[in-house]
Image (cartoon, rainbow, N blue to C red):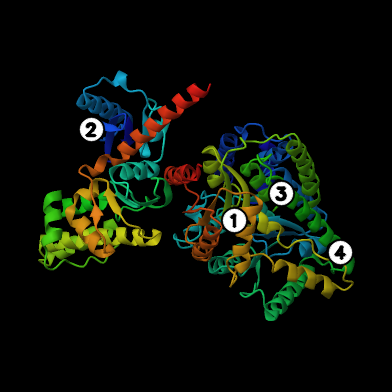
């Protein structure tokens, strides 16, 4: 089992051999440990097994340092690389945009990480940016995504900083700018930041996008335009980290069995 | 222990309340980072002792020297030749700047968004909590980076500060000429301060003293080529940091003892980690006491730092063994000024020497990966990182960039990056 303890949501994925048999996504709240336990229980329930049946748990994400129920810890970089490779073994660039950080991971033909870039000290270019803006515009995710695709005249948002961009949005609204255009401009901003990160590391096809923000089709489409490439988004982009952690757990079990055999 | 020194600090004009806070925090930090290490060389006891009395015993030595009529010269950066200060019969003491404890005081005058080392260097004086600073008769600065250059102007209002000009293009004849003249001017300044005319004998002797210190530090760093290394990166870093302000001859003696113990360890294949622990080189900006942040994160994640391409590492000894065979003051000063231009700091252009150093060291120390460490906002090293990365890529050595300050806020984020890097390095 893999447990991805993120800042905004906690995800768990159960593997039997190499098949995903169940997963869960829960909000993290103020106790990552509690959310971790709940996610494990829920994922097991959906898999039709008992938590006692779980042989090995790998924890990832920022909450992994406080997961006493985990057998080992692996960073979310390695896990996202592994999870993405499992979904598509032609993937060489993984873009993960989560609640509080964004990263670009370069993987090789074996699914191993060869390089990575992270933005985890600034909210711009992360889910937090979109969350703040959704509140300011009074739009939900779907509406924002829809606007990003359909706007004829996206506003130009000049501010890089989430806090200052929010002020800019309020100013635009006061001037009578349409919510749809502003939403499109914001999605463009975030896509721009992500595209810069990808170019820094060097784009290698094929590209796969994971994390909650991948659900925003508007951002994905804008990214595809900027990078001039097709971006694959898995059906459930949020659980790729947990999936990768589960794959790490599977490898750990195999290694233990191998060592037992040798001894 | 420290209570014996209260009167001494009061007499130095130390802000006792704030100073007490600093002294209360340090032992806990040191215990956590240093004293929990397993299998430390016994000779590290001397350096632990130095830190335990960091504001006491050495300061008393300086004040005793002042009673004897000597002057105390404080400095921040390697480009101030120690040989000259010793020759002038003054005591040279390196100032720290490795903590954000004095940010508030510094930010009353300096901008918030600058190098944490520059901010702290100024802040420790502005807040009056450094007895070394209080005891200093003069500060010698240098025109390495813009931030330091301008900070020295403001520092001069709190403590007399003399700034040495360092050339920008060190490989030219003009540069060597300029730096020679600057060091000759520094010599006059020191003679004026101390009332002691520097002689050929003074310089021959001081060159010998500092050569010996550099030689022993070189040997210390070289012991870490062993697989596994006999000493941790944290411990070696500490020794390099203390080199800046301890009495040079005592330091040389004590470090020679440490090197002997380490060479014995190497013979018996005793290391501080497993032979297969990832070997990391840290390259970039210096780490002043008590900045142990990155080393602690890396070595707590199961890796070992085997070399620092830094002012608190290989750059400290890059002047090499200075030839003191000349028989004129001018000749000896020229030997010194030429040697000091061998320090490959990013304030120089082009700085190809540093790129080559990184490649060479990565090979010599059998490094698995390099962490390029920069202090926040450091333009020089941040920009040069691109060249270092490219050169290391050509020899298949991966590099991770960490740009940070002294705060504990980003320890989690840095840990994740370091751990991910180490996971990447696993065969």
Q: Are the residues flagged by discs 1 and 2 in contact, CB closer than 8 Å?
A: no
Query: In the rendered image, which residue does mark 1 sit on?
Result: B286
* Of marks 3 and 1, the one in the foreground: 3
The location of residue B411, given as percent across then percent down, is 45, 44
The location of residue B270, given as percent across then percent down, is 70, 34
Classify mark 1: helix, strand or loop.
loop
Q: Residues within 10 Å of mark 1 (few under 14, many from 20)?
A: many
Classify mark 3: helix, strand or loop.
helix
* Of marks 4 and 2, the one in the foreground: 2
Query: In the rendered image, which residue does mark 3 sit on?
Result: B222
Query: In the rendered image, which residue does mark 2 sit on?
Result: A24
Give the alpha-carbon distance from disc 4 to disc 2, as whole Å.
Answer: 74 Å
Q: Are the residues flagged by discs 4 and 1 in contact, CB closer than 8 Å?
A: no
- The mark that comes first in sequence, 3 or 4, is 4
Give the alpha-carbon distance from disc 2 to disc 3, as whole Å.
Answer: 52 Å
Q: Which residue in the rendered view is the most extreme toward the bottom?
A: B174
Residue at 21 percent across and 23 percent down: it is A48
Q: Residues within 10 Å of mark 2 (few under 14, many from 20)?
A: many
Q: Give the vertical position of A240 relative to B191 (above or below).
A: above
Q: Give the vertical position of B84 relative to A127 (above or below).
A: below
Query: In the rendered image, which residue does mark 4 sit on?
Result: B204
Residue at 62 percent across and 33 percent down: it is B35
Q: Pick whichever, B411 or B68, lies toward us.
A: B411
Give the alpha-carbon distance from disc 1 to disc 2, as whole Å.
Answer: 46 Å
Q: Residues within 10 Å of mark 3 (few under 14, many from 20)?
A: some
Classify mark 2: helix, strand or loop.
strand
Q: Chain of mark 2?
A: A
Give the alpha-carbon distance from disc 3 to disc 4, as whole Å.
Answer: 27 Å
Give the alpha-carbon distance from disc 4 to disc 1, as whole Å.
Answer: 29 Å
């Amino acid at each position: 089992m893999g447990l991805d303890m993120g800042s905004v949501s906690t995800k768990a994925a159960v593997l039997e051999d190499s098949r995903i048999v169940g997963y869960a996504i829960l909000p993290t709240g103020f106790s990552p440990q509690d959310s971790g336990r709940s996610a494990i229980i829920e994922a097991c329930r959906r898999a039709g097994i008992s938590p006692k049946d779980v042989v090995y748990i790998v924890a990832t994400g920022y909450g992994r340092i406080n997961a006493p129920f985990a057998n080992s810890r692996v960073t979310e970089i390695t896990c996202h690389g592994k999870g993405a490779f499992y979904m598509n073994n032609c993937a060489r660039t993984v873009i993960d945009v989560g609640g509080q950080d964004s990263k670009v991971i370069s993987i090789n033909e074996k699914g191993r990480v060869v390089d990575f870039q992270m933005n985890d000290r600034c909210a711009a270019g992360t889910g937090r940016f979109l969350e703040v803006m959704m509140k300011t515009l009074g739009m939900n995710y779907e509406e924002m995504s829809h606007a990003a695709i359909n706007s004829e005249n996206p506003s130009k948002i000049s501010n890089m900083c989430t806090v200052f961009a929010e002020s800019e949005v309020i100013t635009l609204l006061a001037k009578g700018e349409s919510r749809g255009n502003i939403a499109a401009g914001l999605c463009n901003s975030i896509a721009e930041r992500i595209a810069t990160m990808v170019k820094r590391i060097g784009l290698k096809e094929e590209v796969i996008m994971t994390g909650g923000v991948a659900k925003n089709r508007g951002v994905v489409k804008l990214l595809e335009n900027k990078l001039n490439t097709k971006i694959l988004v898995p059906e459930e982009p949020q659980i790729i980290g947990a999936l990768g952690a589960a794959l790490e757990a599977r490898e750990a079990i195999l290694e233990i069995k191998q060592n037992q055999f040798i001894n | 222990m420290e209570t014996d020194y209260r009167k001494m600090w009061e007499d130095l004009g130390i802000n006792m309340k704030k100073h007490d806070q600093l002294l209360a925090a340090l032992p806990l930090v040191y215990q956590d980072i240093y004293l929990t290490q397993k299998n430390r060389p016994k000779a590290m006891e001397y350096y632990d002792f130095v830190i335990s009395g960091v504001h006491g015993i050495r300061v008393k030595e300086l004040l005793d020297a002042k009673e004897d009529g000597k002057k105390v010269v404080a400095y921040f950066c390697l480009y101030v030749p120690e040989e000259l200060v010793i020759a002038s019969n003054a005591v040279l003491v390196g100032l720290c700047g490795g903590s954000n404890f004095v940010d508030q005081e510094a930010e009353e005058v300096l901008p918030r968004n600058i190098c944490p080392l520059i901010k702290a260097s100024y802040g420790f004086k502005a807040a009056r909590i450094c007895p070394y600073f209080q005891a200093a008769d003069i500060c010698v600065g240098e025109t390495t980076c813009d931030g330091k250059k301008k900070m020295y102007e403001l520092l001069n209002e709190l403590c007399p500060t003399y700034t040495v000009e360092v050339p920008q293009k060190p490989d030219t004849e003009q540069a060597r000429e300029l730096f020679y003249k600057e060091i000759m001017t520094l010599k006059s300044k020191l003679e004026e301060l101390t009332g002691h005319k520097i002689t050929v004998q003074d310089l021959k002797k001081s060159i010998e003293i500092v050569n010996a210190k550099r030689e022993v530090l070189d040997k210390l760093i070289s012991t870490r080529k062993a697989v596994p290394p006999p000493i941790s990166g944290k411990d070696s870093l500490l020794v390099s940091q203390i080199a800046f302000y301890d009495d040079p001859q005592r330091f040389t003696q004590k470090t020679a003892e440490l090197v002997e113990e380490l060479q014995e360890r190497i013979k018996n294949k005793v290391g501080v980690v497993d032979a297969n622990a990832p070997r990391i080189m840290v390259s970039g900006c210096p780490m002043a006491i008590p900045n142990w942040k990155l080393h602690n994160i890396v070595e707590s994640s199961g890796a070992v730092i085997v070399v620092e391409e830094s002012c608190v590492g290989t750059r400290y000894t890059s002047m090499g063994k200075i030839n003191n065979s000349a028989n004129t003051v001018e000749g000896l000063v020229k030997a010194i000024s030429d040697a000091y231009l061998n320090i490959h700091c990013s304030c120089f252009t082009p700085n190809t020497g540093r790129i080559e150093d990184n490649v060479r060291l990565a090979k010599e120390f059998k490094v698995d990966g390099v962490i390029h460490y920069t202090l926040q906002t450091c333009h020089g090293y941040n920009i040069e990182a691109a060249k270092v990365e490219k050169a290391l890529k050509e020899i298949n050595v991966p590099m991770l960039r960490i740009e940070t300050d002294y705060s504990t806020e980003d320890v989690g984020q840095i840990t994740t990056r370091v751990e991910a890097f180490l996971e990447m390095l696993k065969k």
